[in-house]
Image (cartoon, rainbow, N blue to C red):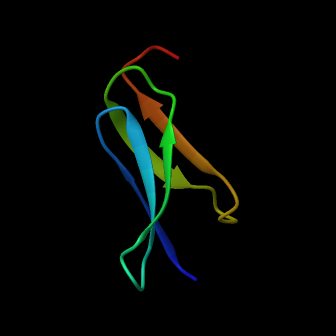
Amino acid sequence: MGCIVSASWETLKVWDAESGETIATLEGHRNIVTSAAFSPDGTHIVSASDDGE
């Protein structure tokens, strides 16, 4: 299964690339998420935000 990660205000979403269904919503940032990516091996997601964390 291929996945896509997207960033929005304070959350990340993981999507199934084939069906378009949301697999997970990840929360924890307290300000706008500016970027998100999978690690090279696809086992982790990294994100950055303007919350100073």
Residue at the spot 56% in from the left edge and 44% down from the top edge: 46
Residue at the spot 29% in from the left edge and 34% down from the top edge: 9
Q: Residue 53, percent across and down?
A: 53, 17
In this picture, is 31 found above or below 44?
Answer: above
Residue at the spot 46% in from the left edge and 26% down from the top edge: 29
Q: Residue 6, percent across and down?
A: 37, 54
Q: Residue 18, percent across and down?
A: 42, 85
Task: Give the camera-side residue of 30 and 35.
Answer: 30
In this picture, is 46 found above or below 14?
Answer: above
Count of numbered badges drawn on the protein? 0
Residue lying at the far top in this picture: please name it. 52
In this picture, is 2 found above or below 51?
Answer: below
Q: Quadrant of the N terminus?
A: bottom right
Relative to 5, is 2 on the left or the right?
Answer: right
Residue at the spot 35% in from the left edge and 22% down from the top edge: 31
In this picture, is 9 found above or below 39?
Answer: above
Relative to 42, is 36 on the left or the right?
Answer: left
Q: Residue 50, percent across and down?
A: 36, 21
